[in-house]
Amino acid sequence: MKQSDKLKMIEDYLKKASLAHTLPRMSECVVLRQFKLEAPILDVGCGEGVFSRVCLGEGKIDVGLDPDERVARLAEKSGGYKRVVVSGAEKMLFKDESFKTVISNSVLEHIEDVGGVCREVRRVLKKGGRFILLVPDKKASEYLFYALVLERLGLRGLAKRYIRFKDKLYRYVHLEKREFWEEKARRAGFKVEGVTGFISPTMVKWIDFLSPLALADYILKGVFGRSFVFRPRFIDRWLAKVLVKYGGVVEKDKATGWCFELSKV
């Protein structure tokens, strides 16, 4: 992916989202775009649809799936999907072998029954199809900016409370290590074809440092169901350069997020 393309993609996403939200999403997008996704494609946990439209292009994904009806309606308007279905991932109303590719971007860590979702994804995949799964790693919590500041001040108790607060705020059910996800995938009958690490410790610090600026957006999104952006464009251009420098694929020993390429055999 060319640097100029990355910059444009990031700036487009910044028009629709907060800084703290854009940083991880665009890092994920850089990783996801290394794959050639074969149609028909299902996006499990599609959200508002901004990610798919900016990352993969308008109308490139056949079906978006989300349990939140209000969010799903926004996904319909986003232009990222040919069709949007309101449903949970634990039991999908699709026939067996309906899709050639299933993607899920930072969704399964919020779902209790991960094994059930993986089995259901395998059911709706055609033989030889791929499941591209992106999730954060547990060690991301070790690099939260404000927790590190509190630790340096000798306030370890407050640092731990802050980490628990962020986990609750992000509604994590499973913030796990790489091995957890590989085991769940194998038990569901998938073959792990490849694992890519992304989001560096430096990026985690940036995300956490900028998170207070996303508070207004978080509140407004809860009320109106969509994001609002009021930043000057020069900030977005500067941040896009930061993302290009620190985002995307990183060495596995430094990764705080994982992209699994799983195949149905």
Image (cartoon, rainbow, N blue to C red):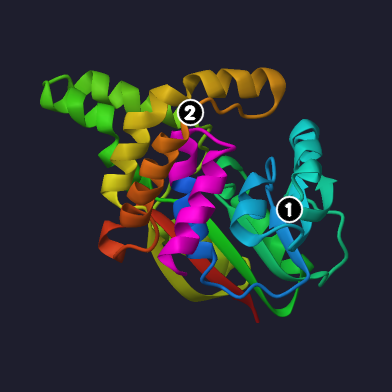
**Is residue 29 at least partly visible in the picture?**
yes
**Is residue 165 at least partly visible in the picture?**
no
Circle 2 packing at 10 Å, graded few (<14), some (14-19), many (20+), is few
Residue 230 is left or right of residue 128, and the answer is left
The residue sitting at 63% across, 61% down in the picture is 56
**Magenta span of residues:** 1-23
Q: Secondary structure at mark 1?
A: loop
Nearer the observer, disc 2 or disc 1?
Answer: 2
Residue 111 is left or right of residue 255, and the answer is right
The residue labelled by disc 2 is 231
Q: Is residue 134 above or below residue 226?
A: below
Specify the quadrant of the image occupied by residue 247.
bottom left
Circle 1 packing at 10 Å, graded few (<14), some (14-19), many (20+), is many
Front position in the image: 139 or 26: 26
- Name the amino acid, label 1: Gly
The residue labelled by disc 1 is 80
- Counting from the top left corner in percent of width and height, residue 85 is at 84, 48
Q: Secondary structure at mark 2?
A: loop
Q: Is residue 58 above or below residue 204?
A: below
Residue 35 is left or right of residue 27, and the answer is right
Front position in the image: 155 or 119: 155
Q: Is residue 98 above or below residue 86?
A: below
- Name the amino acid, label 2: Arg
Residue 60 is left or right of residue 166, and the answer is right
Label located before the other in sequence (2 or 1): 1
Specify the quadrant of the image occupied by residue 234.
top left
Assess whether residue 14 is covered by the magenta stretch.
Answer: yes
Front position in the image: 56 or 109: 56
- Counting from the top left corner in percent of width and height, residue 7 is at 45, 55
Please tell me the numbered disc located at residue 244. Answer: none
